[in-house]
Image (cartoon, coloured by chain):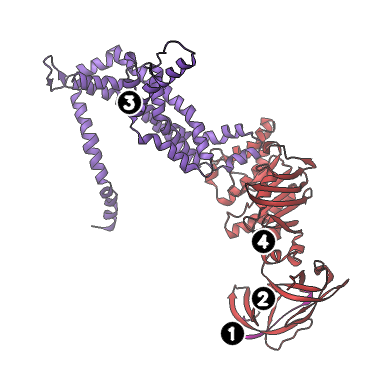
């Protein structure tokens, strides 16, 4: 074998464990799901193999699914926006803090040491009828009856923000940390106030991180089923809950497969759109 | 265009004092260099003039007005940073136009002024490109164009040439001086490179450990250093302990073993107040290495041995052994340099020396 051929093969040899894992654990199961989605669940509860479009017809035409999909995207969008607004100042603070950056980043990672489910459930102890906040308000006499604060869309968003904020902060931090601080000095020296130089220089240069954090929050938010399950009311189901319901509760694998593929396609489209945009962002980063 | 005055300025960071009580006067239109090793406080001074740092004590005046409470964006200064600090997401033209947007310059006028600034730095055709597409030297020129297009009162240059390679650095040095002459703006230049300082400045401020060691013209600072630090920082010097036997109006006479009596002219002995212990400062390039037995007119000589020869092409640097002392000499090469271990005669002319007060023993 020539040297060139050997060198050309080398990356593939190094990649092969990862490629094998991705193929066996992701691509193959995904193919199963695609196949499943065309099967049919009969009245007896058995799945009938074949090529039926019934599941797809139901998933695409039933306004129930459509409304929940829209609601899911809306919740994910609001969560992303809140994370961006709350995360940017924190990320900016960490990126500009001298000396204790490592400690601040460690603190940011700390929540990951506790299970996401436990963190989500902890809100019940805070906002529940006999939770910390109600007890406090009752004790101060501001209210005489406990407030019903849990199990609505707001608490779902709250739980998601709690879960996703570190991802947003980390992504923004990484791009802010890469920006040369003398750029702001330069803008100031040329006559821009601190706010103007932030808008003109720092913000545009940190957009790639904001976009990456936004995408991550949106996709993770739109795909979640634990948060609405724990913190949402009966009307706050998100799309992943439908998939869970179909597969685990009703044992209707074909319908569940079609629904999960639907979510996959919608989020995949979003990533594709982002990718086009990231092409530009990356270009900007390359210039930096 | 304005003068810059520092009055008893002190800058402390927590417990560390970066700049001790410093007073400086930079006249209108002058090119003044703050020269010193890293950590000497030169950049801290520049950043205080710029408004990027607030002085802990003292007053800074630009154009006669105290600016301690004027924020950086209202000081009307042009700053060129060491790493250029060009905005990577803006084109060269947008970079140069940045400061004009905040000065109410009419849109129609901006393009013309940007072009004029690009012409001045001899890069008229790069306006549409992004900074990353330019070489280091070109980016440097754009940073300069961006700083001068706003017609600043003072131009501040923070080691602007240190990121360039040697040849480019020398070209840019000439270029920078030409542009400064052309627009006549008061300029404060920070560098640790003595040759840059000597070549470009009207006046050099030598700093060390947060204090001003000497301020004067390049010639003064070079030939008549005010301290041992200045003598050693600007090129290599031999500093020899001596004894001042007479100190009069026409100079001083130093006793220097084993050379003998060395009469120092008055203007080079002004830092020596009285007879007593003194130091003789002799620049390495003023110490001549001569063949054995040579005794040119007006040169005080003594025999010595060549220890090390550092060949540099046009010049040669000798390390010479004289008793328990090592001396440095930098000489032009005439024919062939002396060899290591050669016995030679070394000597100097008294008028090339200067005197500093010595420590009492």
Answer yes or no: are tags 1 and 2 on the same subunit.
Answer: yes
Dot placed on the residue nearer the N-terminal end, 1 or 4: 4
Q: Residue B350: horizontal and vertical position, in percent?
A: 78, 76
Disc 2, SS: strand
Magenta residue check for B221: no
Residue furthest to the front in view is A139
Q: Within the image, what quadrant is residue A276 found in?
A: top left
Q: CA distance from mark 2 to mark 3?
A: 78 Å
Q: Which callout, 3 or 4, points to the residue nearer the camera?
A: 3
Instruction: Say few, some or many: other residues with alpha carbon within 10 Å of mark 3 (under 14 / 14 to 19 / 20 or more).
Output: many
Answer yes or no: are tags 2 and 3 on the same subunit.
Answer: no
Dot placed on the residue nearer the N-terminal end, 4 or 2: 4
Name the chain under label 2: B
The residue where tag 3 is placed is A223
The colour assigned to chain A within the rendered structure: purple
Q: Residue B134: horizontal and vertical position, in percent?
A: 55, 47
Which region of the structure is painted magenta?
B335-351
Name the chain under label 1: B
The residue where tag 4 is placed is B194
Q: Residue B288: horizontal and vertical position, in percent?
A: 70, 78
Answer yes or no: are tags 1 and 4 on the same subunit.
Answer: yes
Asked whether, in this view, residue B17 is left or right of residue A141, the answer is: right
Q: CA distance from mark 3 to mark 1?
A: 83 Å
Disc 4, SS: helix
Q: Which callout, 2 or 3, points to the residue nearer the camera?
A: 3
The residue where tag 2 is placed is B331
Q: Quadrant of the N terminus of chain B?
A: top right
The colour assigned to chain B within the rendered structure: red
The residue where tag 1 is placed is B341
Name above or below for residue A173 compared with residue B233: above
> Viewer-proximal residue, A18 or B231?
B231
> Viewer-proximal residue, A69 or B142?
A69
């Amino acid at each position: 074998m020539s040297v060139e051929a050997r060198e050309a093969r080398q990356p593939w040899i190094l990649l092969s464990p990862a490629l094998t894992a991705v193929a066996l654990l992701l691509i193959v199961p995904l193919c199963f799901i695609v196949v499943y989605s065309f099967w049919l669940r009969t009245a007896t509860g058995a799945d009938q193999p074949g090529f039926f479009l019934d599941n797809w017809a139901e998933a695409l035409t039933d306004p129930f699914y459509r409304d929940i999909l829209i609601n899911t995207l809306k919740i994910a969008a609001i969560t992303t926006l809140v994370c961006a607004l709350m995360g940017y100042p924190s990320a900016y603070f960490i990126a500009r803090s001298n000396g204790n950056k490592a400690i601040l980043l460690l603190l940011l990672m700390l929540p990951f040491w506790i299970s996401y489910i436990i963190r989500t459930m902890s809100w019940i102890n805070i906002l529940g009828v006999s939770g910390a906040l109600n007890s406090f308000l009752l004790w101060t006499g501001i209210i005489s009856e406990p407030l019903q604060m849990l199990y609505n869309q707001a608490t779902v968003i709250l739980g998601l923000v709690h879960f996703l904020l570190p991802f947003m902060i980390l992504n923004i931090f990484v791009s802010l940390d890469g920006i040369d601080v003398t750029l702001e000095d330069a803008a100031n020296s040329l006559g821009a106030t601190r706010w103007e130089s932030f808008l003109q220089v720092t913000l545009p240069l940190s957009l790639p991180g904001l976009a990456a954090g936004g995408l991550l929050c949106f996709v993770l938010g739109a795909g979640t089923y634990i948060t609405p399950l724990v913190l949402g009311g009966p009307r706050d189901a998100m799309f992943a809950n439908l998939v869970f319901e179909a597969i685990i509760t009703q044992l209707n694998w074909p319908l569940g497969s079609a629904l999960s593929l639907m979510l996959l396609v919608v989020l995949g489209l979003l990533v594709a759109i982002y990718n086009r945009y990231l092409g530009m962002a990356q270009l900007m980063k390359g210039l930096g | 265009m304005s003068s810059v005055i520092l009055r008893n300025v002190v800058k402390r960071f927590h417990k560390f004092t970066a700049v001790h009580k410093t007073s400086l006067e930079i006249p209108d239109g002058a090119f003044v260099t703050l020269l010193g090793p890293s950590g000497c406080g030169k950049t801290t001074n520049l950043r205080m003039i710029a408004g990027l740092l607030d002085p802990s004590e003292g007053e800074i005046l630009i154009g006669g007005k105290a600016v301690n409470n004027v924020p950086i964006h209202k000081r009307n200064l042009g700053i060129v940073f060491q790493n250029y600090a060009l905005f990577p997401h803006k084109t060269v033209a947008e970079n140069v136009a940045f400061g004009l947007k905040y000065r109410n310059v009419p849109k129609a006028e901006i393009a013309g002024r940007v072009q004029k600034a690009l012409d001045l730095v001899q890069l008229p055709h790069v306006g549409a490109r992004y900074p990353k597409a330019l070489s280091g030297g070109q980016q440097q020129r754009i940073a300069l164009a961006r700083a001068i297009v706003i017609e600043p009162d003072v131009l501040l240059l923070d080691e602007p040439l240190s990121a360039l390679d040697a040849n480019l650095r020398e070209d840019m040095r000439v270029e920078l001086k030409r542009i400064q002459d052309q627009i006549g703006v008061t300029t404060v230049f920070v560098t640790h490179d003595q040759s840059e300082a000597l070549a470009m400045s009207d006046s050099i401020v030598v700093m060390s450990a947060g204090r001003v060691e000497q301020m004067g013209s390049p010639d003064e600072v070079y030939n008549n250093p005010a301290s041992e630090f200045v003598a050693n920082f600007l090129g290599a010097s031999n500093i020899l302990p001596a004894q001042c036997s007479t100190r009069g109006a026409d100079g001083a006479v130093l006793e220097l073993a084993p050379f003998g009596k060395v009469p120092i002219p008055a203007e080079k002995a002004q830092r020596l107040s009285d007879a007593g212990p003194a130091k003789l400062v002799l620049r390495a390039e003023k110490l001549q290495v001569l063949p054995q037995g040579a005794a040119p007119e007006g040169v005080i000589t003594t025999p010595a041995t060549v220890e090390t020869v550092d060949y540099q092409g046009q010049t040669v640097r000798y390390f010479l052994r004289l008793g328990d002392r090592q001396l440095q000499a930098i000489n032009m090469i005439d024919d062939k340099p002396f060899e290591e271990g050669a016995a030679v005669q070394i000597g100097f002319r008294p008028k090339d020396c200067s005197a500093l007060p010595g420590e009492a023993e």
